[in-house]
Image: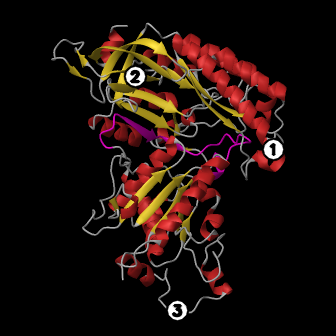
Amino acid sequence: MLPRVRALRAAGLLRPPGAAPRTGAARRARCGPGERPAGRGVALPAGPDLRHFLRAAAARQLGPSQELPPEPGCTPGAPKVYLETYGCQMNVSDTEIAWAILQKSGYARTKELAEADVILLVTCSVREKAEQAIWNRLQHLKALKARRPQARAPLRIGILGCMAERLKEEILHREKLVDVVAGPDAYRDLPRLLAVAESGQQAANVLLSLDETYADILPVQTCAGGTTAFVSIMRGCDNMCSYCIVPFTRGRERSRPIASILQEVRMLSDQGVKEVTLLGQNVNSFRDLSEVQFQSVAAPGLSRGFSTVYKAKQGGLRFSHLLDQVSRIDPEMRIRFTSPHPKDFPDEVLQLIQERHNICKQLHLPAQSGSTRVLEAMRRGYTREAYLELVDHVRDSIPGVSLSSDFITGFCGETEEDHQQTVSLLREVRYNVGFLFAYSMRQKTRAHHRLQDDVPTDVKQRRLEELIATFREEAARANAALVGQAQLVLVEGPSKRSASELCGRNDGNIKVIFPDAELEDAAECGAPGRAQPGDYVMVKVTSASSQTLRGVPLCRTTLSRAAASH
């Protein structure tokens, strides 16, 4: 018998083989407050036990710069876990957190599906299409599970993240394929859930937390030796936009202590990472309440003409302070952040971006729609006019700034006139990068309860195609303005289409492709050589499309030197 199974049986969490099934009353008696028995003959331990709560409390008492003593490392014959990530960059970060927890519990990592003893899918629930991709993947894994040799331990399959939070019951009972379900705030509980699953029982924990930020866990980077990394600084969202499932799958806003974020960024700098993106569902509403002396600080003002569904939040160290501290760690490390809300751009943030050479002059300003009427139905807290005023203010404050945005077409009640207003906003602002989607109704949201998804699918698709065509036309014009200019590019690696070319991104987060050739060093202190991932190269742009710049490399340089020469 496996050690974890013995421990669980000793604690009364598992019934011994052959034990009689509990009656309905007995199963209910075993459930905690607000829990339900999971199904006939199956008891689901739905959350962490007392030891896990005590351990979490101990971790918080240690402070952000300390960690709990590491658990035993991987040993020969350790179970192998295969992690697969879907959706946004927050899920990439969550994958790294989950792997850090499992690694400390003695698991080994594999990139080969056939080798895995545990397969974990980190899922997205923001649109129906994202969830359907997971259901399709599970059908493939079902066949893999059926072909598993009897000599090997049974394959365990887990669903993690937002889809787990939204569809726990359906996931567990649909074809009985999934063994473990863990929501975004339950990754610490993964070792226990997997131990339960070793016995053949299903296990779930989708409890949302008001304070979980995983601040004491240093994520294990899934791309070792990479030049870029993502650092999660806050979780959840309080905006309650009527279309959005995030507050229901990731919970309320809570921010990591600044000290733990700085520790992680320093670690990444020491590893040679050259670009860090600060992550959060509403990243610029960051508010660190861990230091008592700052808990009475007045709330910063919102962008002009913007409002929220909640009262102003007093106290805490804000995003401008964090951005200031992070940008001071390494002058050769670029800093980006996503995804912000347009309401949270006080002047001190814009001024900081303009002043610091290593904070990228690129902002994501999610508009969602160009129609004030639709924006009101979405509960976005601003009008078209207020949004355009913010765009003008941003461009005045940060000359040459690159802008990106999100748009949803076909939202409840959207008319053809509303759609044309969104088209005109795309033309007026002329974004460099855009993310455009057809509306997908999500259960639990305000739109699901109060509005009608009344735009036909074919109309949504037509409007989406029109938005995409308009965006590409305007982005091509915006990027064409860079032809003839020298752009500083952080090299990421070889181009996917040609081994003789390199690929990287400029300050505006636009992909740049250029020949892999011998280059002089701008400092004139090194021999000519080829650029490597993590190098900064000055590239003269020779052509542009809506998504890509092409150019010729001029020299290798550094971020600080390039800034000083402008």
Task: Pick the residue in front: 496 or 430.
Answer: 496
The mark closer to the camera, 2 or 1, is 2
Q: Which mark is residue 453?
A: 1
Left or right: 450, with 325 as reference point: right
Query: Does label 2 or label 3 sit earlier along the sequence?
Result: 3
Callout 1: 10 Å neighbours few (<14), some, many (20+)?
some
* Residue 245 is a magenta residue: yes
Span colored in magenta: 224-249
Left or right: 514, with 518 as reference point: right
Q: Which mark is residue 19?
A: 3
Callout 2: 10 Å neighbours few (<14), some, many (20+)?
many
Left or right: 146, with 115 as reference point: right
Label 2 to label 3, Cα distance in Å? 65 Å
203, above or below 65, in the image: below
Q: Where residue 320 appears, x then y in whole percent?
A: 50, 27
Q: What is the quadrant of the N terminus in the image?
A: bottom left
**Amino acid at the residue labelled 2:** Ile
Label 2 to label 1, Cα distance in Å? 42 Å
The mark closer to the camera, 2 or 3, is 2
Q: Where residue 288 appears, x then y in whole percent?
A: 50, 40
Residue where numbered disc 2 is placed: 513
167, above or below 147, in the image: above
Q: Judge whether residue 25 can be spotted in this image.
A: yes
185, above or below 1, in the image: above
Q: Kindly indicate the quadrant of the structure image that contains residue 468.
A: top right
Query: Does label 2 or label 1 sit earlier along the sequence?
Result: 1
- Say what secondary structure mark 1 lies in: loop
**Amino acid at the residue labelled 1:** Asp
Left or right: 486, with 234 as reference point: left
Are the residues at dot 2 and dot 1 in contact (C-beta closer than 8 Å)? no
Task: Pick the residue in front: 221 or 186.
Answer: 221
